[in-house]
Image (cartoon, rainbow, N blue to C red):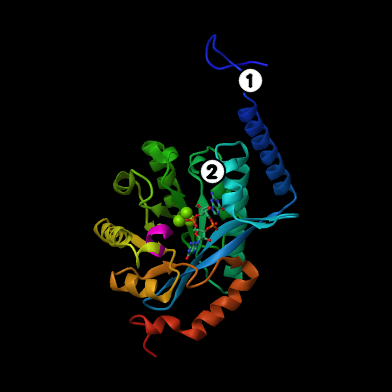
Amino acid sequence: QAKTSGKNRYQLFDPESDRKAQLHRRTLESLELALQQQQFLLYYQPKVDLGSGRIIGVEALIRWQHPERGLLAPAAFLPTLQGSELETAFGRWVLDEGVAQAARWQAQGLGMAISINVSANYLLHADFYPHLQQALQRYPQLPPARLELEVLESAALADMDQALAVLQQCRALGVHFALDDFGTGYSSLTYLRKLPLDTLKIDQSFVSGMLEDVDDLGIVASVIQLADVFQRQVIAEGVETMAHGAVLLQMGCRLVQGYGIARPMPAAELEGWCRQWQLQGLWRQLGDGPVI
Ligand code: C2E
Ligand code: MG
Ligand code: MG
Ligand code: MG
């Protein structure tokens, strides 16, 4: 069996790439089935202000509760989804579930801001804005400003005009935006100049490495300065120890997220975690915590 690629060009059957294509198809099929069978769920990782000790919100992170393989992280299935038809269905599901959870917390008096990761493909898809609008309309009690969308620097965002149009539309609803994994892409500065992004997220690799690696430390310091110059908020992810927190505070970055504060957890555990965090008062050892 020969496959055409381009005009009048024939390639020999390549068993290796055929096997890969089959595997890709099968994985997509199983992802679609798993979505129908509600095997996906969102975990939530707290974000805190180390200066005041306040919990400022949570980031929603998708997990696959696989019937045989256990709980799977996004690295196990997001790459397959990327660029597929199914990416839109997943994007919708994550928005719906995240907004619904934010509304539940709101109703419980736990006014929790929620950050949702949106792939660039979905952000620029025609379905995205109307779906977001619908999701927010479903919960009129939920202030749209409680919702932040995290977008990765990526090639898809390179269409600045289109990206700008969507971001402006969403911001008119009151929704905020963060640029995720800042510093790992190559056109960060262009995004920063042109796009109305509220927050820069310093990539976890730089933060977790900054105590041993001066280059990482330099990058972290530069992003904090950039955020200051462009008047954006800055948050550091990958804060694995209190030492990371202390160094970030010294550099003027108060907002943090990382295993040292809390690992991502199911929604049901978050309320208990919040109570415990308030009680422990660990942040008071670090900075200008609340005066009691
Ligand atoms: P991200 O948005 O940059 O999320 C942060 C990732 O770093 C999460 O990995 C989190 O568990 C991990 N992390 C948090 N604190 C630490 C730390 O102190 N040290 C280290 N080493 N890692 C830490 P996770 O949950 O595996 O997610 C990986 C990526 O998958 C996310 O990176 C995001 O880009 C993507 N993702 C996750 N959920 C969704 C989703 O619902 N939709 C889309 N489109 N992408 C998602
Ligand atoms: Mg993120
Ligand atoms: Mg990130
Ligand atoms: Mg990341």
User: Farthest residue in the left direction?
Assistant: 229
Q: Secondary structure at mark 2?
A: helix
Residue 196: % across, % down: 35, 50
Residue 118 visible? The answer is yes
Q: Which residue is mark 2?
A: 128
Residue 121: % across, % down: 51, 40
Residue 23: % across, % down: 67, 36
Question: How many marks do you count on the picture?
Answer: 2
For this rendering, which residue is in front, 186 or 136? 186
Earlier in the chain: of badge 1 and badge 2, it is 1
User: Farthest residue in the bottom direction?
Assistant: 292
Residue 108 visible? The answer is no
Q: Main secondary structure of the magenta part?
A: helix
User: Farthest residue in the top direction?
Assistant: 8
- Which segment did they paint magenta? 204-208
Q: Give yes or no for residue 205 being in the magenta stretch.
A: yes
